């Protein structure tokens, strides 16, 4: 359901809209989806601690928002977000929020993640402290610090690691205080789809990132090969998702994920043939939807075993 958008008297975005822009809701499925998969896998073993599930989901969301805000602040300081950028307006570079306020909001988001983590540490042990600290540090250093790795082409690896492997296995661990090989295998398709969201972002921003000396993987590979990488990430998610069935741990319900293939093919064609900002912005949002739908179907497939 949609309705009129509330704006300020001058027609500019309202305060709430500005902070929603800063949080980048299109990226938030990458935070929730792996928690669903890891928790569903844990449910196949025994009953769940629902408070742990809620704390893990909220903690992941706050880390994602904190990372987005940190990126907004740091990119503006480094001059990577300019008026030529094809993506949505960034609140710091666009002058919508003072940099200091964005920085405070970043600390608040990570602080909220820490509060969620305290409960998880109590029930699952100090290993969660290491996981949470590493996740927050990686989020800050993505575009912050003296040598941000997002500017050196390692952003996709960060997303695959922390929003795939760490998030799925961590969500399983908080429920079982143990790890099984299936958690690592099922984390692979989740990480691939989460990374694909960033790939679309970097394909869209390739030209402006190159001018800003932001050497993303797309800048290093070039547009054509990065489009091929995007297609490979999406398509590889399917065989890896059904590996636990093929290896005998679960039944064929994991194949439910193939219901998302039509959306995958459309996204591959769109990214392969588009260079304009609005089309790629829509593709980025739909890639987030794809990840969420894929993980929901994977979750259902696990629960039907």
Image (cartoon, helix red, strand yellow):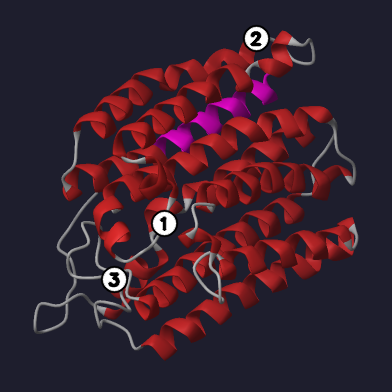
Inter-mark Cα distance, 3 to 1: 30 Å
- Residue underneath mark 1: 215
Give the mark nearest the N terminus, 3 or 2. 3
> Helix or strand or loop: what does disc 3 sit on?
helix
Q: Which label is found at residue 252?
A: 2
- Residue underneath mark 3: 17
Question: Which is in the foreground here, disc 1 or disc 2?
Answer: 1
Q: Which residues are magenta?
A: 289-305
Quadrant of the image occupied by residue 222: top left
Vertical comparison of 191 with 111: above or below: above
In the picture provided, is 303 more to the left or to the right than 26? right
Main secondary structure type of the part rendered in magenta? helix
Give the mark nearest the N terminus, 1 or 2. 1
- Callout 2 environment at 10 Å: few (<14), some (14 to 19), or many (20+)? some
Question: Which is in the foreground here, disc 3 or disc 1?
Answer: 1
Q: Magenta stretch: residue 301 in it?
A: yes
Inter-mark Cα distance, 3 to 2: 43 Å
Name the residue at 81% across, 59% down: 128
In the picture provided, is 53 more to the left or to the right than 292? right
């Amino acid at each position: 359901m949609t309705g009129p958008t509330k704006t300020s008297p001058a027609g500019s975005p309202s305060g709430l809209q500005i902070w929603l822009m800063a949080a980048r809701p299109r990226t938030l499925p990458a935070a929730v989806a792996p928690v669903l998969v890891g928790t569903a896998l844990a449910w196949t073993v025994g009953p769940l601690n629902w408070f742990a599930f809620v704390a893990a989901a909220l903690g992941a969301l706050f880390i994602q928002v904190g990372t987005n805000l940190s990126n907004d602040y740091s990119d503006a300081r480094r001059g990577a977000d300019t008026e030529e950028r094809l993506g949505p307006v960034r609140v710091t570079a666009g002058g919508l929020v003072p940099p200091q306020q964005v920085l405070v909001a970043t600390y608040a988001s990570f602080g909220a993640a820490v509060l969620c983590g305290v409960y998880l540490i109590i029930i699952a042990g100090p290993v969660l402290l290491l996981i949470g600290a590493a996740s927050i540090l990686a989020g800050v250093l993505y575009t912050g610090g003296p040598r941000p790795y997002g500017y050196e082409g390692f952003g996709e690896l960060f997303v695959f690691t922390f929003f795939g492997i760490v998030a799925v296995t961590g969500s399983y661990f908080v429920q079982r205080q143990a790890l099984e090989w299936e958690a690592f295998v099922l984390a692979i398709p989740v990480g691939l789809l989460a990374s694909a969201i960033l790939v679309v972002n970097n394909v869209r921003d390739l030209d402006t990132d190159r001018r800003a000396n932001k050497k993303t993987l797309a800048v290093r590979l070039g547009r054509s090969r990065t489009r091929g990488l995007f297609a490979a990430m999406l398509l590889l998610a399917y065989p890896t998702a059904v590996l636990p069935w093929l290896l005998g741990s679960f039944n064929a319900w994991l194949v439910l994920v193939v219901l998302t293939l039509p959306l995958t093919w459309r996204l591959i064609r769109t990214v392969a043939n588009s260079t304009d900002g609005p089309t790629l912005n829509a593709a980025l949002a739909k890639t987030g939807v794809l990840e969420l739908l894929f993980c929901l179907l994977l979750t259902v497939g696990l629960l039907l075993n």
